[in-house]
């Protein structure tokens, strides 16, 4: 055990700043008048998160990968990149929180958001099973609460409770896998486990399966996806957006680390498992999404499908393949946040997320419909948006590695995807509100929404057009894994 | 560095589209003026590119290359050759005339022109891209606005169905081709999407034979090849006039062109191996399309199926892999593009006034709409390949090419000329001559100046090209030389 050196704290600089921000939010909250809270809290949290992002980028960048804090966290570019995604997503989510009723003026909501973000950051950086488990729980518990935050809404309560039940069950199973491997290998460090883990035998197979259960829940892979639609539908929309993006990305960070660092010797087996999971996840997600009548449920199934696409890159393995996963997550994060942002903005006015609430949106607010167009086309994988490049890259990775059938499955799935995304666009551009009363029912955008959606839309287009720097970032991030 | 004229052509419509989106929705006149001036600017530049293309030197010209993603060998690599220069010009022409005849669109013209222009950018981009990745990039940009354009501004009865059908067909085709393209990328080992480098990659014959059908047919879906043509007439009919013009006039060429560029030029061995049966598909297009067109009673469906038939001629011209066939196909792409744009413009004008496209219900339109009648007659003459019009310049070499390959096919394909003559003349007689039904008496307002200008412009191009084939054939010839050299001098 190394002695404590203050400069290793740089490895957790973002988390420390988030912690500080949380304390500031909590302390200042009682001093503000009820009427001002919404604005003050939201802007404070969002600004604090953006500041964290910038400060971390300026002074907190990792050099050579090192273990810090007694081997608990690994300070490397992969973890750092994911941390930046989470902080960005949290900042945008804080903006979206502001104008959500019952959520925007409660300091607890922002605090829970920050706590979950700290947990995610640690998930991405954890180099040790104990740290990893703690980080996963630090992420999950605030999210359970956030999903059920609307205590006067049955659906929200159901969402929180369901998420909690599924979450604790699967994380217990995962914990059992952790303890099993610790018992046999005598170490909790991921890299050491990876070096010592033998070929296929009962122990390694149980480790693999038990851990996969927990992770598959996190990123809602088939057959552990059942919670996602109900939770997304019931949870406050910005929370659902956060769950489907940052929380999922955190799950992917852990998947990459665990499978590649801790189980390289099993790669022949888990690649096949992941390939099958990816196929089923994509197909089930897309097929069920087509039948949905509620846009949040549709997006929930679509986000299940997207986890499947991202896994294609992991199946391809290798530096290029895993880089495409990181790139995919980056593009998906921006896109899905934008989609949920639009839904939150419309839901705030219309009070519903069923499709008819979106009829005639183009005439009610053309900017909002344009953002939705960008987000949905990006999800469908159309240029010049990030989703197109991301999809092409994962398919390219699959073909490079010889997984042509998987690429074909992905390609066919994106056709189903296109169908329901276009259908949703048809509702907002073509269909009319009841009584054609769009003029009398505008959907005004608050400054917070405008800012969040602007940032996301620009991000989606930039990633779709100037994709090279982002992909370079993704590929240097994954170099640490190999 | 030289003047980046191709990038300006490609990005002008997109930038104009974005500017239009930023304008206030109720300032409709300003929006239309912006659209028209952007389109005119793009047309002028494409005319300039066309006429300053050096056909003696041939090869790719106006080359621009910017590294876009060196890690994977993606670059923004533009250039035109003798095959693509006429198509760039065609796109410019259709864009300007499309804006002119869409002047009357009153439902959200801002979104309409913005989507139309994004589509136009995609089309230009495909025609000039020499990088396979960028080709797909622009290809998809050209596909998705179609959905919205047809679904929102289309014919109310079928628009939702037709728009979705069209988009899904085209998307399926393009992703199938994409898988093939990615396979090419990795197999070449050159780590580049540069199509000139890929053409020199010497793929093994087995590889080429395996992947050619996917790549060629994937793109040919957009060219309307049998049995994947089904989306096309439905789409044409449902689309608003300007979109029909774009769709039949330019987008179908996009499919044929990409099938040539990526399919035949990058996988020549595969092309030689598979062409014997592709000729049959194209033959079915030609003959079947013509017969189906003959029995239609909806004016727009007639034109829609005639497009299927005429695009079959393009495909069969490719499939012969002979110099004559390819030259004819190249000219046919341009000629049919102008002709079908004119037809759809004319149909739109009649429909806007009569509110029906049922041929038996129409009649006597030549009196109130003389210019439309003349334009349609010119289009019909082009359509049946009458000498003196551009259709002849295109179809004659194609038939020569087929004859050289297999005379029997030429004979069968020639049936279509007779059938085409029959249906276009019937349509002209029923719609424009004869007795005008009483309910239209006094209700047919004359067309406006912009409509007239568009029709006159399109007609004069077809006559001009028919009288002076030298205005296009040398260009196409220089492009065909390169294709043939890749095919190893068949």
Image (tube, coloured by chain):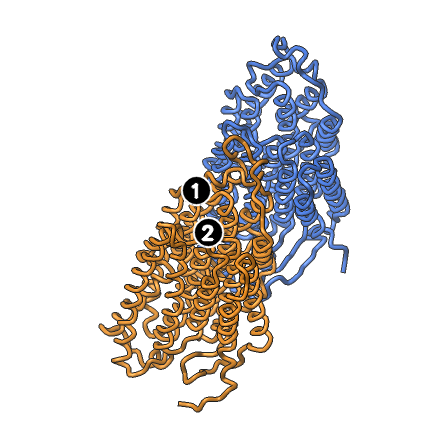
Chain colours: A orange, B blue
Q: At 38% from the left edge and 42% from the top edge, which residue is drawn?
A: A291
Q: Nearer the viewer, residue B188 or A26?
A: A26
Say above or below: A115 vs B235.
Answer: below
Q: At 46% from the left edge and 54% from the top edge, which residue is drawn?
A: A102
Tell if the residue under mark 2 belongs to the same chain as the one under mark 1: no
Position of residue A231 measured from the top left corner of the image (x, y, whole percent): 37, 54
Q: Nearer the viewer, residue A239 or A107?
A: A107
Position of residue B246 measured from the top left corner of the image (x, y, whole percent): 62, 36
Say above or below: A1 vs A463.
Answer: below
Chain for mark 2? B
Q: At 43% from the left edge and 79% from the top edge, which residue is drawn?
A: A73
Disc 2/disc 1 C-alpha distance (Å) = 44 Å
* CB atoms of marks 2 and 1 within 8 Å: no
Q: Read off the residue under disc 1.
A: A354
Position of residue B193 measured from the top left corner of the image (x, y, whole percent): 57, 59
The secondary structure type at the circle numbered 2 is: helix
Within 10 Å of the Cα at label 1, are there few (<14), some (14-19), or many (20+) other Cα atoms?
some
- Tell me the quarter of the picture where residue A314 sits: bottom left
Position of residue B395 measured from the top left corner of the image (x, y, whole percent): 62, 32
Q: Is residue A437 visible?
A: yes
Closer to viewer: mark 2 or mark 1: 1
Query: Which quadrant of the figure contains the N terminus of chain B?
Result: bottom right
The secondary structure type at the circle numbered 1 is: loop
Q: Nearer the viewer, residue A62 or B60?
A: A62
Q: Read off the residue under disc 2.
A: B211
**Position of A90 compared to B41: left or right?**
left
């Amino acid at each position: 055990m190394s002695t404590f050196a203050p400069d290793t704290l740089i490895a957790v600089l973002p988390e420390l700043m988030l912690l500080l921000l949380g304390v500031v939010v909590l302390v200042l909250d009682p001093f503000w008048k009820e009427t001002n809270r919404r604005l003050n809290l939201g802007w404070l949290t969002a600004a604090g998160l953006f500041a964290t992002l910038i400060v971390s980028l300026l002074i907190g960048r990792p050099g050579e990968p090192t273990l810090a804090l007694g081997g608990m966290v690994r300070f490397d570019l992969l973890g750092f990149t994911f941390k930046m995604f989470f902080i960005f997503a949290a900042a945008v989510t804080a903006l979206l929180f502001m104008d959500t009723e019952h959520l925007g003026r409660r300091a607890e909501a922002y605090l829970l958001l920050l706590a979950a973000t700290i947990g995610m950051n640690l998930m991405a950086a954890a180099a040790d099973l104990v740290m990893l488990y703690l980080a996963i729980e630090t992420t999950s518990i605030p999210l359970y609460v956030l999903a059920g935050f609307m205590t006067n809404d049955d659906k929200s309560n159901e969402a929180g409770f369901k998420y909690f039940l599924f979450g604790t069950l699967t994380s217990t199973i995962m914990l059992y896998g952790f303890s099993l491997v610790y018992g046999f290998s005598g170490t909790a460090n991921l890299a050491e486990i990876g070096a010592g883990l033998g070929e296929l035998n009962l122990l390694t197979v149980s480790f693999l399966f038990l851990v996969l259960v927990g992770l598959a829940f996190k990123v809602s892979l088939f057959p552990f996806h059942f919670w996602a639609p109900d939770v997304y539908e019931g949870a406050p929309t910005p929370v659902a957006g956060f769950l489907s993006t940052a929380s999922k990305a955190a799950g992917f960070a852990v998947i990459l680390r665990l499978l590649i660092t801790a189980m390289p010797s099993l790669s022949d087996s888990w690649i096949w498992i992941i390939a099958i999971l990816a196929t089923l996840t994509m197909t089930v997600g897309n097929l069920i999404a087509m039948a949905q009548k509620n846009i949040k449920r549709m997006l929930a199934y679509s986000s299940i499908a997207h986890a499947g696409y991202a896994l294609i890159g992991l199946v391809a393995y290798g530096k290029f393949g895993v880089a495409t996963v990181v790139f995919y997550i980056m593009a998906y994060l921006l896109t899905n946040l934008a989609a949920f942002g639009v839904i939150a903005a419309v839901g705030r006015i219309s009070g519903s997320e069923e499709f008819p609430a979106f009829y005639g949106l183009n005439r009610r607010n053309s900017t909002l419909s344009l953002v939705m167009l960008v987000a949905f086309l990006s999800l469908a994988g159309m240029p010049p948006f990030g989703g197109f490049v991301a999809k092409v890259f994962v398919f390219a990775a699959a073909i490079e590695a010889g997984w042509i059938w998987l690429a074909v499955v992905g390609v066919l799935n994106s056709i189903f995807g296109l169908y329901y995304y276009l259908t949703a666009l048809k509702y907002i551009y073509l269909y009319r509100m009841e009584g054609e009363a769009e003029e009398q029912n505008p959907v005004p955008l608050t400054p917070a929404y405008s800012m969040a959606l602007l940032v996301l839309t620009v991000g989606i287009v930039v990633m779709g057009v100037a994709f090279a720097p982002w992909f370079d970032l993704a590929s240097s991030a994954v170099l640490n894994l190999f | 560095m030289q003047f980046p004229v191709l990038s300006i052509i490609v990005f002008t419509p997109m930038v104009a589209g974005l500017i239009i989106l930023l304008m206030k929705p109720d300032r409709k006149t300003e929006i239309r003026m912006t659209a028209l001036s952007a389109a005119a600017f793009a047309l002028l530049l494409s005319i300039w590119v066309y006429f300053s293309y050096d056909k003696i030197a041939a090869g790719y010209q106006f080359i621009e290359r910017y590294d876009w993603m060196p890690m994977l060998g993606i670059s923004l690599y533009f250039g035109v050759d003798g095959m693509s220069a006429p198509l760039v010009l065609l796109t410019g022409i259709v864009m300007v005339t499309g804006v002119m005849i869409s002047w009357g669109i009153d439902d959200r013209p801002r979104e309409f022109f913005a989507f139309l222009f994004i589509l136009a950018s995609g089309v230009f981009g495909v025609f000039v891209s020499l990088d396979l990745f960028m080709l797909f990039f622009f290809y998809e940009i050209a596909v998705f606005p179609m959905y919205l354009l047809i679904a929102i501004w289309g014919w109310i009865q079928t628009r939702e169905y037709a728009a979705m059908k069209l988009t899904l067909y085209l998307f399926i085709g393009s992703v199938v081709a994409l898988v093939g393209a990615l396979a090419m990328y990795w197999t070449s080992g050159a780590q580049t999407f540069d199509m000139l480098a890929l053409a020199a990659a010497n793929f093994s014959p087995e590889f080429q034979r395996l992947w050619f059908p996917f790549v060629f047919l994937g793109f040919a879906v957009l060219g309307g090849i049998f049995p994947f043509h089904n989306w096309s007439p439905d789409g044409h009919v449902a689309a608003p006039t300007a979109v029909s013009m774009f769709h039949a006039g330019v987008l179908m060429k996009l499919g044929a062109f990409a099938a040539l560029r990526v399919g035949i030029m990058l996988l020549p061995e595969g092309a030689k191996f598979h062409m014997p049966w592709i000729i049959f598909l194209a033959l079915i297009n030609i003959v079947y399309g013509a017969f189906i067109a003959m029995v239609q009673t909806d004016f727009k469906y007639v034109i829609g199926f005639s497009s299927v038939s005429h695009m079959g001629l393009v495909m069969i011209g490719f499939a012969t892999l002979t110099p004559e066939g390819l030259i004819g196909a190249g000219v046919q792409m341009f000629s049919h593009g102008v002709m079908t744009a004119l037809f759809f413009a004319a149909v739109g004008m009649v429909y806007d006034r009569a509110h029906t496209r049922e041929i038996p219900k129409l009649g006597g339109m030549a009196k109130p709409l003389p210019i439309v009648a003349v334009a349609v007659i010119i289009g019909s003459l082009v359509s049946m390949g009458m000498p003196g019009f551009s259709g002849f310049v295109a179809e004659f070499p194609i038939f020569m090419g087929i004859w050289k390959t297999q005379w029997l096919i030429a004979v069968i394909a020639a049936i279509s000329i007779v059938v085409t003559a029959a249906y276009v003349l019937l349509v002209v007689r029923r719609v424009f001559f004869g007795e005008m039904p009483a309910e239209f008496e006094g209700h047919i307002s004359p067309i406006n100046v912009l409509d007239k200008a568009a029709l006159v412009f399109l007609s004069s191009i077809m006559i001009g090209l028919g009288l002076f084939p030298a205005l296009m054939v040398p260009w196409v010839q220089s492009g065909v030389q390169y294709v043939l050299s890749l095919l190893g001098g068949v």
